Amino acid sequence: MRSGNRGPQIEAGYLDYRGEPVEVMPETIARLKAVFRTDARSRSVVLAFEGEPAQLPFEGDLELEGGGVLANITELPEDIEPGYHQLRDRSKSAMVIVAPRRCYLPKSFKVWGWALQLYALWSHASWGIGDLGDLRTFGAWARAEGATVALLNPLHAALPLAEQEPSPYFPSSRCFKNPIYLRIEDIPGAREISDVERLAAEGRALSETERVQRNDVWARKSKALEILYTRFAHDPAFNDFVEEMGAPLKDFSVFCALAEEFGTGWRTWPPEFRDRDSAAVRRFAADNASRVRFHSWLQWHLDIQFANAAGEIGLINDLAVGVDPSGADAWIWPRSFVRGASVGAPPDDYNIDGQQWGVTGFDPVGLEEDDFEAFVQMVRLSMRHAAGVRLDHVMSLFRLYWVPQGETAATGAYVRYPADVLLQVLALESQRAGAFVIGEDLGTVEEGVREAMAERNILSCKLLWFVDDLNELQHLSMASANTHDLPTTAGLWTGSDLQAQAVAGVAPNVAFAEAILDRIRRHMGISLDATVGEVVDASCRLLSHCDAAVVTVAIDDALETVERVNQPGTSGGWNWSARSSVPLDEFVDLERPRRIAEILGEAR
């Protein structure tokens, strides 16, 4: 058993990426303490493993998640079903989480696949942005070439406004998906409506632009979706979906309708609408029932199309580390998210100035007060139809670097989280969904985190560029050459990425880049005059023979793309907007991707 919340635990210091101690300024700690609520109710949480008895903190009635009550018990029986149960007596209560000891892993697990940004994976059929129809086509091709999985960028919902958020890591909600990824023509009746066909022609023309134009794409897709919704009358499958999704979908749909009404996120709405449970919100939902239903209808089609793509290849959803403080999740679960601070990372080799991401993260005190519902729903819905999930910045299960509002990234402190509970939820939801878990553990990682991940069957992220010994690419890991926050192979090898950093206003870490290049040459035994294609092939050969359970290769490396996906520490049109240099229709016929598939398929 663990006790109830004990108030915010803010660490007075930490070891930086070099192992050097850093002392947090007292005023930083004081400012962070001030953002936490002081009126949170204490709550006890009992953690137990499946098939093992456990002592309860007091005698009471155990209300089982699946229904039924075990009356007047002091110990959990060995045969109790895994789940979220409630122990109550007349004066107190405790949450009881019974879960398997480890997250799900397939019995035979040594696979390879592609890492891709779905928005960039455009085709001649899509409307200026890669969509779930493209993902289904890609999945069928990749599976035929021997791949088993595809790692996606976060598909999280953005605010439903005319100006679309470009970063997939700045979501309104991590529980629901962004309808900009819908393939309009796959919605019944779309091909029979002339106005939709006209919008489709305009949308397809957007693929001729150099960058993904999200605002223009959404302007056309939203019109088409509204036209199609007016033709939708009734479908029992839709009703079943709404019932299955329950309160989170209802609240999310109400939020979206309110956001459209006021044109912003909830923090600037009239005060009476900032409270999810207010009478004003209930009246608005009743008066705008059709528009609320429209947003649930969008999520239904996203669920269908994502499931269809997952039927072609195992999809790995990427789960962002935080949310837009003005977005849906922070409105639905206001106690579970901190206000007045944003999350980030202290200075390290990835970014020598540190990072402040602008998103808000979980309030560990409020999260516990809410029985961890926001975390449970986030994990559960991210695993829906997925083969696995990747937790961005998995260290946030243990502690998270908070920066007080208005301060720089170097002026922050670590806040401690109830890792034992969060890991218990991950194991339970992972086993229920049959979805494996990957933890992105790059950057400043405190001692004990990777050991706890291994104990729970959470795969570590290993980068070929960062390991000095190839034996570090052990079985409980996902191995790749690079990530979306790092240069592409072409950008690194040609030196063009250092120039791009300087142009973007980022101080290039030349020594860091040179260290990576040195590792590449040592690992692969290649000369300085090797071509980019030869470097990519050599990387794939090394990855194919490593012991990692999952190996992924970025589509950008298959295309020898120079520009990286994202330049951390910058904001602008260059991030999250580059499209693939060739359409999907041509990509599937290229020799280079097939060559990579052949290399990886030989050993895996």
Image: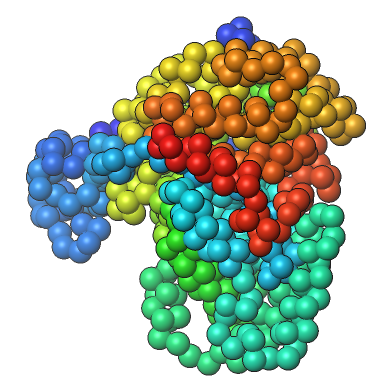
Indicate the quadrant where residue 244 lies.
bottom left
Residue 557 image offset from top left, x and y in percent: 66, 38
**The furthest residue to the top:** 20
Apparent side of residue 479 relative to residue 260 in the rendered image (left or right): left
Q: Is residue 27 visible?
A: no
Q: In the figure, 223 relative to 135: above or below?
A: below
Instruction: Residue 251: give x, y in percent of width and height.
Output: 53, 67
Question: From where the camera sits, is residue 545 visible?
Answer: yes
Q: Residue furthest right?
A: 503
481, 51: nearer the viewer: 481
**Percent x, y of residue 206:** 81, 66
- Up the image or down, 352 lies above or below 389; here it is above
Residue at 43% across / 28% down in the picture? 545
Residue at 57% over, 77% down: 186
User: Up-down: is 211 above or below 337?
Assistant: below
The percent position of residue 490, horizontal first and vertical second, equals 73, 32
Image quadrant containing the C terminus: top left
Task: Please say which color scheme the image uses.
Answer: rainbow
Q: Is residue 39 above or below residue 166?
A: above
Front residue of this view, candidates 92 and 474: 474
